[in-house]
Image (cartoon, helix red, strand yellow):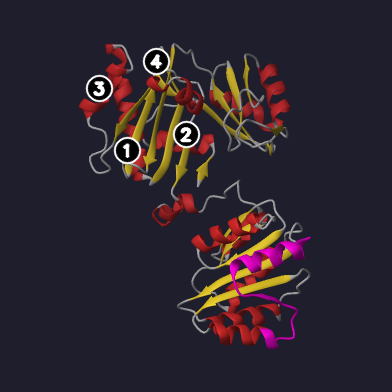
Amino acid sequence: MKLLEYESKELFRQHGIPVPPSGGVIKSLAALPAALKRAGKGPWVIKAQVLAGGRGKAGGIKLAKTPAEARLAARSILGMTLVTHQTRGQGLKVHEVLVEGGAKIQRELYLSVVMDRKSAGPMLIASAEGGMEIERLAAEKPEAILRLAIDPVAGLPSFAARRLAFQLKVAPEHAAGFCRVAQALVELFIRRDCGLVEVNPLVLTPKGFLALDGKVVIDDNALFRHPELARRRDPELSALERQAKAADLSYIALDGTIGCMVNGAGLAMGTMDTIALAGGRPANFLDVGGAADENRVTKAFQIILKDPKVKAVLVNIFGGIVKCDMIAAGILGALGKVKLRVPLVVRLQGTNVEKGRELLAKAKVDIVSAHDLWDAAKKAVEAAR
């Protein structure tokens, strides 16, 4: 789960990480005067709240010295379609902006904590060159990036934080403030089950350090431990993805024409790759899980068929705990409740596969059967054309 900037900064406040004075998030110009008042004396910064980096270069962050300038800035950002290097050519509609007080920046640093798969634990990443895109910095000046493995139990010890401050050439009079921020960032990462916590830039002002920006990604598998975050409405999810989540189905919308219904994430990846090898493009990743019963299959069909891009559906299910004949019966039961408007290709494999295929063959529903995945993918691609 990715958090918007204002949501990330709320967590920062809860963990003692200093952030600029906030006027809150507004969705209309009518709310701007009150937001400016809450943010304190100008100048102010108006920031688009979307899940993408590079907002400043794309016109999604503007500095305002007067209320009139703030109004012009908010008017230009609200409702705009923001295209950055991270949106892959697609625009994100800006529905709300964050109003913050400005900061007198003396120095910028980069600081983050990520889950490092090589060390199988948290990794603190820091650089004296904040404000830059960390990916570009890593490619152009890898020596400028410092890495420190973190013990998920002990966190960041004081001596390690002080050593990091020394390596980043933080002045002695500011070292204590930097250490508090670094340690709090690690604590936030561990306590909130994060996959990423990033501050870019972490700025030094006359009053100390401030997290000028914030990015937090929470591990979805740990949301049961954070009910306040689990209740949050994810702005990245489409209507179909929200419907799938409510039905406890793993669904990710893609841009192809072949709907994929599988049981198991690995099988889903293999199915989508095989479709691509056969010359087609998957319209989604939909995993019904181990219990591919009639109810779940019905909900899966309903979600797939609501996507107007879908020109054919490929069902590729392995019968293990749930046997193939039971899966076939579930598919036929689901098709009795759902109006099928596109070709359907079904490939079953596993326990009682012959019984399952026999059930499908005798059905009065128009089903294209396939005996292996390559055959199924070719038939689905042909049907979608």
Q: Is residue 44 above or below residue 266?
A: above
Percent x, y for residue 276? 64, 54
Percent x, y for residue 252? 60, 55
Task: Decide if residue 305 is in sight here.
Answer: no
Percent x, y for residue 326? 55, 83
Q: Earlier in the sequence, mark 1 or mark 3?
A: 3
Q: Earlier in the sequence, mark 2 or mark 1?
A: 2
Q: CA distance from mark 2 to mark 3?
A: 24 Å
The residue tagged 4 is: 207
Mark 2 and 3 residues: CB-CB less than 8 Å, in contact? no
Mark 4: secondary structure: loop
The residue tagged 2 is: 9
The residue tagged 3 is: 162
Q: Amino acid at mark 2?
A: Lys
Q: Is residue 359 above or below residue 179?
A: below
- The numbered dot on residue 129 is none
Q: CA distance from mark 3 to mark 4?
A: 20 Å
Q: How dense is the environment of label 3, judged by Cα within 10 Å: few (below 14), some, or many (20 and up)?
A: some
Q: Earlier in the sequence, mark 4 or mark 2?
A: 2
Q: Earlier in the sequence, mark 4 or mark 1?
A: 1
Q: Quadrant of the C terminus?
A: bottom right
Mark 2: secondary structure: helix
Q: CA distance from mark 2 to mark 1?
A: 15 Å
Percent x, y for residue 246? 57, 63
Residue pictured at 42% horizontal, 34% vertical: 12
Q: CA distance from mark 1 to mark 3?
A: 16 Å
Q: Nearer the viewer, mark 1 or mark 3?
A: 3
The residue tagged 1 is: 187
Q: Magenta residues, as a range?
A: 361-385
Mark 1: secondary structure: helix
